[in-house]
Structures are given as C-alpha cells and as structure tokens.
C-alpha cells in the first residue's frame, strides 16, 4: 500500500482551497484532492472527457463534502498525473481501481460523470467488492445510441467555441435556451473560483486517447448489466446531446438496483451542474440511506 505524500491535516474547507496531493501508483504519480470528514466510506469522483481537477463544479464538491469524504483525481496521463492516457475504458477503470487501493481503501462509493460513468460501470463489474454504491450521471451503457458520435459533436462545439469566443462546454453541456445559457455561464464562472495552484490542462494526446476510448465504448456490443448488483443512482438532464438521455433511462432499467432520478428539465449533459443543489441533496440521501 502506498502512502500519500502530504499530511491530511488540516482538512480544507472548500474545493477552491483544497491542496493538490499525489500518490504513487505502480511508479506513476496520480494527483488528487480530498476534503470532507475523514471517516466513513470515501466518495471517489470519475470525471468527463477532457476534464481535470478544476473542471468539477465546486458547488457539488463542497455540498457533498459537507457530509462525506470526497476525493477527485486525474487518471493516468490526465492533467498533472503522470504516464500515458489509455485508449480504452477498461484500462482507465483498471487504473482507477489501482489508484483507490494506493490510497489504502478497501471499499468506496463512485460518482461517474459521462466518460467517468463508463469507467464506474467497469470498476463495479470487475471489482464488485471494492464498490459499495454508484452514482451515474450523464452517461450510458456500452453500445448505447449516439455515444459513438461524441467525437464529431465535440469537434463541432470546439469550432463553434473558437468562432464565438465561448467555452465549448456551453454548447455541449447546456441547452440552447435562455435558462440553459444562463446556467452555463454561471457554471463556467464557478470553475474560475480557484485561482491558486490550478491543475494542468489536458494534453492533445490524452484528449485523443479519451475520444478513441469513448468511440470504442459506443461501438461495443451491449454488456450484461445484471452483474452490477450495487445500488445505483442514475441522473441526467432531459436533453443530453452528448450521451442522449434515452441512455439514462436504459441504464437505470437494466441495472438490477438502478434508481432513476426524474430527468432535470431544460437541462443537458451538465444537468448535475445546472441543478447542483438538487443533485447534492439527492446524492447524499442516496449515499446515506
């Protein structure tokens, strides 16, 4: 078992001031941040395409960490973590499990957003005793309709962002309505609250590897989800363009203990960011039940 390099005290009170630590995973440094109570089952967060530590909504992290130990991390090759990013979801899941064990945990809860939800499904299926409960947000099962088109959607949104001088997440994560545009601007402003010791942006090679992994996931034959026997909370916006919302309903229906939260209205892929207060309340209730 590896030991984190830095002392866990004093505990940070908000995500914008949480120190970035590292732990060695088979000779490769993985960076992470931790806050919240130091007891209980930890909640490990698995993030979306191109995301690094600073892409988690601080309102969600702080809200969850008020009652739970929350850990965010950059997987292999992402952000400031070392190594090369794998181009399969299965390899990413393997690395995530190694990271969890490197921190000395025998059992955790998982919150996976988008690509992180793909990873969470594999970890739960392959390492059932390592996982207690899972929350799956803006995600879908292997072979789900539309998942293989994430690359083309992302490229179009990136070009549109460059032409309009806007962050592509405004188009990818939120609806093109008055409420969606307002929610997107508020979310992007919150991501700027941390001003010191920010993470390294994802590299182009890692971004390409992630896109390849997502496309492979979308083209895979459907998995037998009955082997994931964990309690699972499934959430999304009603108008997700990246991972079409029909995947959310399908995922909840196929998981033996899947619980579907009513889809957030006038919300897309970033539904949990747009409805952060509601999501935090629902997630905590689920985790503590």
Image (cartoon, rainbow, N blue to C red):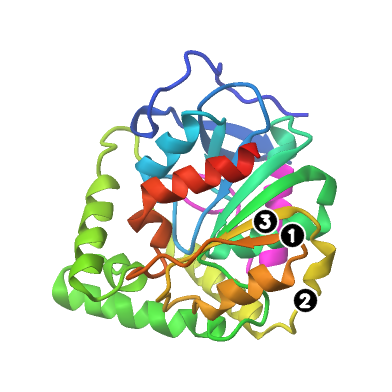
Residue 166 appears left or right of 253: left
Q: Tag 2 or tag 1, which sits nearer the N-term?
A: 2
**Which one is nearer the viewer's eye here, 142 or 205?**
142
For image coordinates 78% across by 29% down, the residue present is: 1
Q: Which residue is mark 2?
A: 223
Q: Is residue 92 visible?
A: no
Give the distance between the C-alpha atoms of the residues marked 1 and 3, in whole angstroms. 6 Å
Q: Position of residue 43 (x, y in %)?
A: 61, 39
Q: Which residue is mark 1?
A: 257
Q: Tag 3 or tag 2, which sits nearer the N-term?
A: 2
Q: Position of residue 52 (x, y in %)?
A: 44, 51
Residue 154 shows which numbered tag?
none
Which of the two discs, 1 and 2, sits closer to the camera? 1
Q: Position of residue 151 (x, y in %)?
A: 46, 80
Q: Residues within 10 Å of mark 2 (few under 14, many from 20)?
A: few
Residue 106 appears left or right of 142: right
Residue 232 shows which numbered tag?
3
For image coordinates 48% across by 65% down, the residue present is: 236
Identify the magenta region. 76-99
In the image, farthest residue toward the top: 10
């Amino acid at each position: 078992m590896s030991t984190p390099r830095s002392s866990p005290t004093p505990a940070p009170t908000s995500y914008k001031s949480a120190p970035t630590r590292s732990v060695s995973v088979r000779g490769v440094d993985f960076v992470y941040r931790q806050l919240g109570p130091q007891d209980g089952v930890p909640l490990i967060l698995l993030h979306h395409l191109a995301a690094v530590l600073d892409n988690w909504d601080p309102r969600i992290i702080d809200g969850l960490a008020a009652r739970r130990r929350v850990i965010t991390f950059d997987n292999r090759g992402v952000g400031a973590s070392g190594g090369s990013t794998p181009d399969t979801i299965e390899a990413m899941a393997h690395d995530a499990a190694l990271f969890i064990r490197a921190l000395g945990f025998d059992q955790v809860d998982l919150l996976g957003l988008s690509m992180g939800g793909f990873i969470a499904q594999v970890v739960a299926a392959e390492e059932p005793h390592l996982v207690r409960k899972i929350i799956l947000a803006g995600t879908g099962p292997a072979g789900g309709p539309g998942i293989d088109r994430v690359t083309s959607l992302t490229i179009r949104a990136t070009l549109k962002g460059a032409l309009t001088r806007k962050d592509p997440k405004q188009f990818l994560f939120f609806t093109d309505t008055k409420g969606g545009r307002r929610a997107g601007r508020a979310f992007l402003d919150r991501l700027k609250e941390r001003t010191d010791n920010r993470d390294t942006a994802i590299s182009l090679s890692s971004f390409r590897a992630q896109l390849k992994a997502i496309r492979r996931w979308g083209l895979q034959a459907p998995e037998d989800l009955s082997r994931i026997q964990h309690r699972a909370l499934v959430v999304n916006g009603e108008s997700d363009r990246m991972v079409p919302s029909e995947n959310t309903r399908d995922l909840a229906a196929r998981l033996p203990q899947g619980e579907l939260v009513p889809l957030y209205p006038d919300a897309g892929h970033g539904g949990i960011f747009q409805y952060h207060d509601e999501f935090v309340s629902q997630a905590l209730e689920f985790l503590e039940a």
